Image: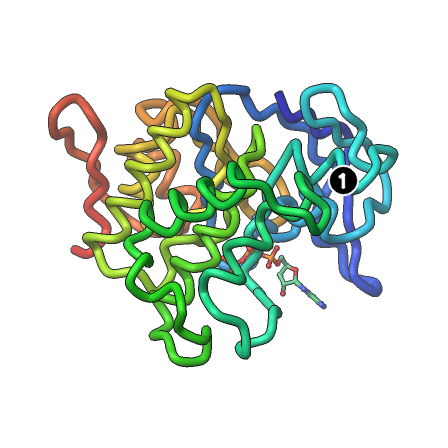
Amino acid sequence: MICVEGVSHSIGKTKILHDISVEVPKGKVTALVGPNGAGKSTLLSLIGRLMPLQNGRITVDGADTVQTPTRDLARLMAVLSQTNTLGSRLRVQELVAFGRWPHHQGRPTAEDARLVAEALEALDLTALGDRFLEALSGGQRQRAFIAMALAQGADWLLLDEPLAALDMAFARRIMAQLVALRAAGRSVVVVVHDINHAAVWADHIIAMKAGRIAAEGPPEAVCTSKVLGDIYDMDLRVTEIDGKPLVLHHL
Ligand SMILES: Nc1ncnc2c1ncn2[C@@H]1O[C@H](COP(=O)(O)OP(=O)(O)OP(=O)(O)O)[C@@H](O)[C@H]1O
């Protein structure tokens, strides 16, 4: 379980997160949703220790994120942020192989090579393995970064908008792969903007608004016209298909 206790965050004089306490269940796919600027990336970055924690406490399966050594944390969780800054003069397979670094520290084994090949295959990148990142489309590059996070083989996968730039077929494929990780005992936290991806694929939804947790629970509890209408300040309708909520927000 990820346990966030009393976490606030400010940038300059602006308070971004307001005393957040929330638990993310282990062995599930949790979707983090909410309007632009709600604080989703900030919360994810603090959990993934991409930014220093200003106050409060965050533990991942009991490990305090401030005190746990980086190498141990990297084996516990893989984080894909929205801003991937690795150089574009890297080849796809080199990027994905970086995901194994916390395990071999520069001396990859045959097992590391196998897991890299598996991650490339999972994201349909095998044929592009020798390409430089700069010679990929935006969606292909996004898939390469997801493959790197997958290859890391961590218990927890934290992904900030992995579906951005992906066509609908790949978006569905990625969500299905995240659900498959759950079957392997791994846990996923994923920021998504299309609420229906959360409604269909997630076990648990955490919705944020203006730096606070606005709602949380299973999709059927969060994906109601009242709850989502209040969070997004808009009228929407919710219907049901195959027992899952379907949010109609285009009308
Ligand atoms: N470096 C910064 N300086 C000032 N404000 C910032 C900075 N980074 C983020 N913010 C503000 O913090 C708030 C939360 O941003 P955050 O990126 O966490 O939101 P988000 O929910 O992930 O949004 P989005 O869906 O648009 O990605 C926003 O109001 C944003 O403008």
Residue 35 locus on image (x, y percent): 47, 53
Whether 195 is drawn above or below 50: the answer is above
For label 1, being within 8 Å of ligand 1 is answered no
Q: Quadrant of residue 181?
A: top left
223 horizontally vs 145: left or right? left
64 horizontally vs 171: left or right? right
**Quick one: SS at disc 1?**
helix
The residue sitting at 41% across, 24% down in the picture is 182
Query: Is residue 228 or residue 8 the one in the foreground?
Result: 8
Whether 147 is drawn above or below 12: the answer is above
Residue 56 locus on image (x, y percent): 83, 34
Query: Is residue 103 or residue 240 the one in the foreground?
Result: 103
Q: Residue furthest left?
A: 242
Whether 118 is drawn above or below 83: the answer is above
Residue 168 locus on image (x, y percent): 21, 55
Give the residue number, with chain letter if any, for mark 1. Answer: 71
The residue sitting at 34% across, 74% down in the picture is 137
Q: Quadrant of residue 166?
A: bottom left
The residue sitting at 54% across, 72% down in the picture is 90
Query: Which amino acid, mark 1?
Result: Arg
Q: Residue furthest front?
A: 110
Image quadrant for the C terminus?
Answer: bottom left
The residue sitting at 33% across, 37% down in the picture is 177
Image quadrant for the N terminus?
Answer: top right
The crowding category of the residue bearing disc 1, from other C-alpha atoms within 10 Å (few below 14, some 14 to 19, many at least 20), is few
Colour convention of the picture: rainbow
**The image quadrant in which ligand 1 is located:** bottom right
Query: Is residue 137 or residue 5 the one in the foreground?
Result: 137
Residue 55 locus on image (x, y percent): 86, 40
Query: Is residue 199 or residue 67 the one in the foreground?
Result: 67
